[in-house]
Amino acid sequence: MHDFKWKHFKGEIILGCVRWYCKYGISYRDLEEMMLERGVEVDHTTLFRWVQQYAPELEKRLRWFYRPRMGESWKVDETYIKVKGKWKYLYRAITKSGYTLDFYLSATRNARAAKVFLGKILRKMKSFEKPNKINTDQAPSYSHAIEELKREGLLNDWVVHRKIKYLNNRIESDHGKLKRLIKPTLGFKSMKTAFATIKGFEVMRMFRKGQLNVWFYKQGLRGEIRFIERQFGL
């Protein structure tokens, strides 16, 4: 119960609200009304604080469970999101199977940002978990980043970098589904709050895609809820 000390609400209620907000693409005010219908009176600003605190913590605690266990080709791309009225870049990578590898929010779209993103994934991996192929668009920043990572030894020299647009159709589609969750936010106010919220969106997308099903086999939605609660000792 230490994670929810002084919160005045049970941990199950807090995690339920965070899960609903990050999974179903609703606004904080909509969620406030939904909770009121269930006899729980909680302000939308409180819901915002819960998401900011517990969505990143949930992603952190589930990181070991969703990491890939074998090397396969990656699909890497970036999409645009609005932060404080300006476009920022959300770098994302998925496997050939469609499972999320990682994500990174950047103020810039260049070789340095691409290298930071790919390096962030690779440094957490063992050699047999690393990819044999990386698919990207035609942006030259990816070529520079991949070459530098090869020189530094984070990528094997024989890894193939493919710049064929249609091979990235799957991640383009995945961007669209993530943006349906982002749309009700009407834009973020800071990079910090944007990335914290996106962590929750990405984790719940992993549940949607069945990426974590192996950890609660054949238990369905109840298994998902119980699995999340167990990460917080509930």
Image (cartoon, rainbow, N blue to C red):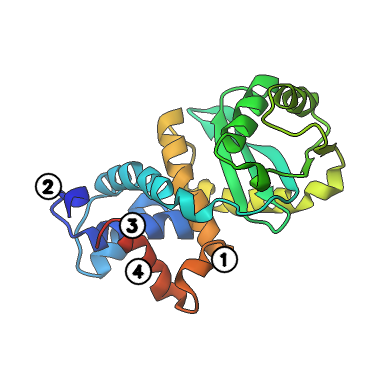
Choose the circle earlier in sequence order: 3 or 2.
Answer: 2
**Residue that carries the numbered disc 4 in the rendered image:** 226
Three-letter residue code for mark 4: Arg
Could you tell me if the residues under marks 1 and 4 are in contact, i.e. CB atoms within 8 Å? no
Label 3 – label 2 distance at C-alpha: 19 Å
**Residue that carries the numbered disc 2 in the rendered image:** 6
The residue at the point 67 percent across, 47 percent down is: 128
**Mark 1 packing: few (<14 Cα in 10 Å), some, or many (20+)?**
few
Residue 80: x and y in percent read 63, 35
Q: Which mark is residue 210?
A: 1
Choose the circle earlier in sequence order: 2 or 4.
Answer: 2
In the visual, does 9 lie left or right of 86? left
Picture quadrant where residue 189 is located: top left
Three-letter residue code for mark 3: Gln
Choose the circle earlier in sequence order: 1 or 3.
Answer: 1
Label 1 – label 2 distance at C-alpha: 34 Å
Q: Judge depth for marks 3 and 2 and give the one in front.
A: 3
Three-letter residue code for mark 1: Gly
Q: Nearer the viewer, residue 187 or 222?
A: 222
Could you tell me if the residues under marks 1 and 2 are in contact, i.e. CB atoms within 8 Å? no
Choose the circle earlier in sequence order: 4 or 3.
Answer: 4
For label 1, the SS is loop
Label 1 – label 3 distance at C-alpha: 18 Å
**Mark 4 packing: few (<14 Cα in 10 Å), some, or many (20+)?**
some
**Residue that carries the numbered disc 3 in the rendered image:** 231
Quarter holding the N terminus is bottom left
Q: Is residue 41 in view from this perspective? A: yes
Three-letter residue code for mark 2: Trp
Q: Nearer the viewer, residue 211 or 181?
A: 211
